[in-house]
Amino acid sequence: MRPLRPADPSAIAGYRLLGRLGAGGMGVVYLARTAGGSLAALKLILAEHAADPGFRERFRREARVAERITGRWVVRVLGSDPEAREPWLATEFVPGPSLAEAVGLHGALPESTVRALGARLADALTDMHEAGLVHRDVKPANVLLALDGPRLIDFGIARSAGATALTATDAMIGTPGFLAPEQARVTGAGEVGPPSDVFSLGCVLAYATTGRRPFGTGSVAAVVYRTVHEEPDLDGVPEALLPLVTACLAKDPADRPTAAEVRARLGSAGGPAGDWLPPGLPALIAERSARVLDLPVAEPTVVASSAEPARTSPSRRRFLVLGSAGAVAGAGGLTAWLVNRGPGGTGTGSGGPPAALPTYTIGVQTDLSGPRALDGRAQERGARLAVETFNARPDRPFDLAVKVRDDAGEPARAGAVAREFVRDAAVVAVIGPTTRETVIAVADTYNAGLLVCATVAVGIDQMDLPGQTTNPTYRELRVHHDMLQLPFTSVALVREAVRTAVVDDRAAGDYSWRVANSARTTMSQVGKVVTTHQVRAETEDFGPVVREALATRPDAVLYAGVSQRRAGLCAKALKRQGFDGLCGGVEYALGPEFLSVAGPAAEGWYFGTTYVDPALVPGAKAFTTAYRKRWGLAASAPVDRFAGEAYDVVTGMAERMRDLVSSRKLAVSRESLRGTMRVFTYQGIMKRYGFDEQNVMMFKYHSELFLYRIEQGAPRFLGQFEKAGKDEKKRRGKG
C-alpha cells in the first residue's frame, strides 16, 4: 500500500481514505475506513473513462452483479454509485495475500489447506451459480486468504449465464492458464456457463497443490493451445485429490462436476476455519492487519485561500491548490531547458553552487559494436538525455549518473557486464539489453542481485525466464511480441482482405508459428481465412513457398519471421511472381538490411512496431529538438528508433525513485525500486507504459502498437495502429 497523493481526496461519499492499494489507467483503488470504523477497498473510476457510455454501463453491471453476491466466502459490497461523475464501488477489505502471492512466497500448500480452500471456493461458486451468475475469472490472483478462510474477489467480468457480451472486446474472457477450453475457443458467450468456473477451480486447486500452472507457462497463444488440445500436468497433485481435479479439468463441460458436487467431495465449507492455513501465512496476515489498523486518518482536504498567510512548510493537502500550477510551470521550464541547454549538461540558472545530493547510477547494458549497434546507440543516447534532463530539475532530491557497457549482443559478454553491474553498489537499475539471447544470459544474474532490468527493444516470453514469476526484476516495457502482427492484420481488415497467406519462416523458430497462430486467431474471429506456408530455415529460396502461398489467391501476405534479410528475399519473390496485394511483417524484420535486399519490392510494405518516430509525435517536439541538438544531428535528421522509449523509461524510473524519497520517505535501493516497479504505470512522452495490477508480468496497454509503411524506400511512421487504420479507411474513401 502507498500513501495518498497530494491530489487525492481525503473522503469519498463518507468513506475516509487512508492510502492507495493500487492504480492503473482506469482509476485508483483506495484503502478506506467506513463511518463505523470498518476497512474497505474503494474502487474509483476516472471521469475520462466514465464519460464513455459503454464503459459506464460495464461498471454499472459490475456493481449490480457484485451486490447480488452475498455468500460467506466472497467479499461483500458495502456501497456504490455507478452514476457519480467518478463512479465508485466499495467492498470489504481483506488484508491477507492472494493465493498467487502465498504460493509464490511459501510454495505449494498442504492437502488439508487445499481441501478447505477448495470447499469454500466451491461454496462461493455454488451460491453464484444458484443466483444465475458466472464468475468467469477464477484464478489465484482473485482469491484472497483471510484467517477464517478464502475470499473470492473481482466480479468485473461476471455476468448472468448465457448473457451476451457488451462489446466485441469481450471476445476471449478470463485469464489464460485458468480459463476453460470453451472460453479459449471464443465460440460464443452462451457456452461460458457454470462449468467454466468449475474448470477454473480445478486449475486453481492444481496450482495450489503443486505450485505450477496445469497448462504451463509461456505465450498466451501457447497456453491457450495447450488448454484446448492437451492434457494438464497434474504431477504432484495428491492421490486423494487427483480424481476430483481431473474431473474438473475435463475438456467437455458436460463431463465436469457441478460446484456443489465439488464442495460435497471436498468436505464441509462451514464451521470454524482458524487453523486452515499452514505455518507462516497466519503471521503474514496478522502483520498486514496490524499495519492497516494502525493507519492514521488523513486530514480533510481543504482549499487554501489566496489570503492565507504564507507558511514555510505547507501541508500535504495544500498542494491540491498548488499542484496544478506547479505542474504547468515545471513542464514549461523543462521544455525550455531541453531546447536551450548547453552540450555540457548544465542549466543556465545563476546562483551559488548547489548543495551536494546523493547520486544513483542507471546502468545501460547495450550493443554498441554488434548486429544491433544502431539500436544500442539509440538507447544509450535516450538514457543519457533523460538523466541530464532530470539532473537539471531544481526540485530533484538526488542526482542520477549513467554507466554504459557494450555487450556487442554476445551472451558471454552480456553475462560479464551483468556481473559487473551487480557488484557495483552504486547501480540501482539497468536498461537494456538488445537481444533475446543476451536477456536470457543476464536474467538470473540481475534477479539474484535484485537489479531491475528494463528493456524496450527485446521481445521474450518473460514467464520462461527462471525466477521471474512472482516478484520480477526483468521488466519488458512493450507489448508482448506475439501481438506485433495486429497492426498488419488491422490494415488487412480495413482493406477488406478475405484471404491472408502467412509465410512461416522456420529460421525464426517457434516465434514464426506464434505470429502465424496469432494472425489466424485475429482474422478467424471476423470470418476471414488465413493459410500458413512454411519455408525451411536452411534455404534462402523463397520462390516455392511464395508460389504455394499465391496459389491460395490471397488478398494479403504476412511475412512471419525476424530476419531483415529473409524478409527482403520474401519481398523480392512476391514481386517477381507478380503479387501486388497487401504485404507486411513485424518489427524485427524492419531495418536497413530489409530495404537494401528488397530494393523496389519493399515499397508499400506495412510493419507493426512497439516504437514510435518522435519527430511525428505531437507531444515530443521538445524532446526531438533537444535530442538532435545534444547529439549534433541535422534539424531534419530522423531520431533513432528506441531512443524515445529509452528516454521515457529512464524518466519513469527516476519518477518512481523520487516517489520513494519524497512521498514514501524510503531510501532508494535495488530492493525498494524493484518493489515500486512491480506494478509500473507511466505516461511517457512517446506512449504509455505499465503492467496489469492482477498480473504483474503482463504489459497493460495492448493498444501501444504502431504502424509503419515503406514509402519511397524509407519507413514512414503512420501512428498508433488503430488510429492509423481509421486514417487508412478514410484515405481509401470508405470513412
Image (cartoon, helix red, strand yellow):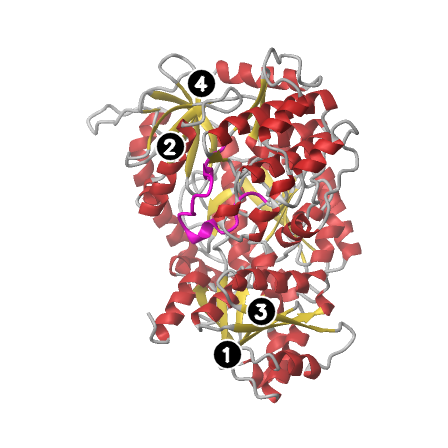
Identify the disc placed on residue 530: 3
CA separation in Å, label 1 and label 2:
50 Å
Q: Position of residue 164 (x, y in %)?
A: 42, 47
Amino acid type, label 2: Arg
Q: Which segment is the magenta one?
A: 154-175
Image quadrant in which the C terminus is located: bottom left
Amino acid type, label 3: Val
Residue 157 is covered by the magenta coloring: yes
CA separation in Å, label 2 and label 3:
41 Å
Amino acid type, label 4: Leu
* Mark 1 or mark 3: whose residue is earlier in sequence: 3
Q: Camera-side residue: 613 or 357?
A: 613
Label 1 close to label 3 by CB (< 8 Å): no
**Residue 719 in view (yes/no):** yes
Label 1 close to label 2 by CB (< 8 Å): no
Label 1 belongs to which residue?
Answer: 604
* Mark 4 or mark 1: whose residue is earlier in sequence: 4
Identify the disc placed on residue 39: 4
Look at 33% across and 42% down and name the residue there. Answer: 50
Amino acid type, label 1: Gly
